[in-house]
């Protein structure tokens, strides 16, 4: 048996029986094993911390999916919404007849009804440097996006990295300026720019768009284009980017019909305000009064439905949930390998402890405590790393990363469970260890 092993065994005996005249106790064997492990313990903690950081990152992305799923609706002022029977999600809503809003307005309890138009169209992303901007461009087929070695650099460094002129899809929202359906800052920006937005070819661009869409270059770019038509910026507004759209523009319904070449009588959403406290009754009356070419949902219903779609029914949410599972499996394998090797290398020490009167359950507890120590220390390191990665991801990708108490609790719970399982699987060799193994 190695001198360090004898010292560890002696230390455990001292911690169990105590030493007269000393005001402290010798550290537990599990802690001494972790400290004595040196580089091996550091490697184990690093591996587990990396896995737990990945868990927190996947949970952060999953929370970002929830936030962006609800964000569009939370920016809109409505109590009840009219949707197409073919509605899938906010970015694939289908169309409803405009006259249904007029009919809904006549239903008792409904205070107002506002249409919202939506579609995807190509946006002319300016070239960088801006001096390369050649003015009005040829047809879109001549300007399809080209892969570039600078793509990764643009992701990290933003809009200042050189890039060619290209077209990319963004989301277009059309509104009736007399019935502004937005709330908060977006509503204020629309009202401030309403006189300009009534002019032909005027749009508002999302200030939080991907850098390629050119908001940061707005003072230097002369030529903007939406759907093949030249437009001018009337201002900007703040809106979180989602997983389905890297940018959004808002225009009035007349410009929407002209720029997107869609009929103005086919909105995607009907946003209704009802008398306070009468939402449930209004939904029931609307479902009875309106034909089957529209769905009627309350605000809470559509928020739950949209969140469920993005988190549970799309590959985006499922991918991040699967990532949590994979990261925890990696953490379990790392801890199991370290503990299994540690138990095998220290069998003589454990045999000594058995000879000193330690029961098998007590030895099991030492190994499990060691596993939990690895997980707890790794968890603390992972939280610090996750905070850094969250901030970097939010700044670089524009994704709303939130380190919620729920994510912290889930990760800690998973870490403890994995530690217990890994420790339990690592103690099989202790069942056969005997004091005679020392000789």
Image: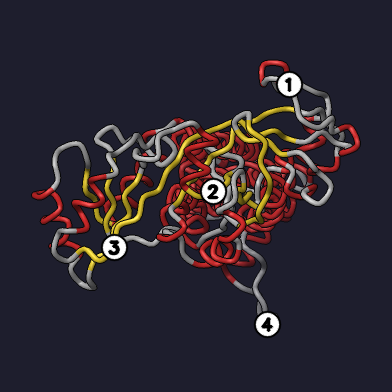
Dot 3 falls on a residue whose secondary structure is strand
Spatial CA span between label 3 and label 1: 44 Å
Could you tell me which quadrant the C terminus lies in? top right
Q: Is residue 379 visible in this depiction of the protein?
A: yes
- For this rendering, which residue is in front, 430 or 92? 92
Q: In this view, does 335 lie above or below 64?
A: above
Dot 4 falls on a residue whose secondary structure is loop
Dot 2 falls on a residue whose secondary structure is strand
Q: Which residue is drawn at 39% across and 62% down?
A: 77
Q: Is residue 426 visible in this depiction of the protein?
A: no
Residue picked out by circle 2: 251
Residue picked out by circle 3: 112
Position in image of residue 387 (x %, y %)? 67, 57
Q: Which of marks 3 and 1 is nearer the N terminus?
A: 3
Could you tell me which quadrant the N terminus lies in? top right
Q: Which of marks 2 and 4 is nearer the N terminus?
A: 4
Q: Which of marks 1 and 4 is in front?
A: 1
Tell me: 389 left or right of 251: right
Position in image of residue 360 (x %, y %)? 46, 48
Q: Is residue 112 above or below residue 136?
A: below
Q: Is residue 401 above or below residue 268?
A: below
Q: Which of marks 1 and 4 is nearer the N terminus?
A: 4
Spatial CA span between label 2 and label 1: 24 Å
Residue picked out by circle 4: 23
Q: Which of marks 4 and 3 is nearer the N terminus?
A: 4
Q: Residue at x 35, y 34 (%)?
A: 94
Q: Residue 138 carries which label?
A: 1
- For this rendering, which residue is in front, 37 or 386? 386
Dot 1 falls on a residue whose secondary structure is loop
């Amino acid at each position: 048996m190695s001198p360090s092993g004898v010292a560890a065994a002696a230390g455990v005996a001292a911690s169990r029986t105590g030493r007269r005249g000393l005001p402290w106790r010798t550290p537990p064997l599990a802690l001494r094993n972790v400290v004595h492990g040196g580089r091996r313990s550091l490697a184990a903690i690093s591996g587990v911390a990396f896995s737990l950081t990945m868990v927190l990152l996947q949970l952060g992305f999953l929370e970002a999916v929830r936030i962006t799923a609800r964000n569009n609706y939370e920016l809109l002022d409505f109590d009840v919404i009219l949707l197409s029977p073919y509605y899938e999600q906010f970015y694939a809503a289908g169309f409803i007849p405009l006259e249904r809003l007029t009919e809904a307005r006549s239903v008792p309890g409904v205070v107002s009804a506002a249409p919202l138009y939506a579609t995807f169209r190509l946006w002319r992303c300016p070239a960088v440097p801006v001096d390369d901007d050649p003015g009005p461009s040829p047809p879109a087929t001549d300007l399809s996006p080209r892969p570039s070695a600078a793509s990764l650099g643009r992701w990290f460094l933003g809009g200042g990295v050189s890039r060619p002129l290209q077209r990319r899809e963004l989301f277009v929202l059309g509104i009736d300026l007399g019935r502004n359906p937005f709330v908060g800052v977006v509503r204020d920006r629309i009202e401030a720019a309403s006189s300009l937005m009534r002019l032909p070819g005027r749009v508002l661009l999302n200030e939080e768009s991907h850098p390629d869409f050119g908001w940061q270059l707005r003072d230097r770019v002369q030529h903007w284009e939406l759907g093949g038509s030249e437009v001018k910026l009337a201002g900007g507004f703040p809106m979180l980017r989602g997983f389905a759209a890297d940018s959004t523009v808002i225009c009035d319904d007349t410009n929407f019909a002209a720029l997107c070449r869609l009929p103005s009588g086919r909105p995607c959403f009907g946003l209704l305000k009802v008398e306070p406290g009468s939402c449930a009754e209004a939904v029931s009356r609307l479902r009875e009064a309106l034909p089957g070419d529209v769905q009627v949902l309350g605000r809470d219903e559509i928020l739950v439905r949209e969140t469920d779609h993005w988190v549970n029914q799309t590959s985006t949410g499922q991918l991040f949930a699967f990532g949590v599972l994979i990261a925890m499996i990696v953490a379990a394998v790392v801890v199991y390998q370290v503990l299994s090797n540690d138990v095998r290398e220290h069998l003589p020490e454990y045999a000594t402890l058995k000879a000193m009167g330690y029961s098998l359950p007590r030895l099991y507890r030492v190994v499990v405590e060691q596993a939990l120590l690895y997980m707890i220390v790794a968890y603390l390191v992972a939280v610090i790393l996750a905070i850094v990665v969250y901030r970097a991801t939010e700044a670089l990708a524009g994704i709303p990363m939130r380190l919620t108490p729920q994510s912290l609790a889930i990760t800690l719970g998973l870490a403890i469970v994995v530690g217990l399982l890994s420790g339990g699987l690592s103690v099989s060799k202790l069942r056969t260890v005997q004091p005679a193994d020392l000789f």
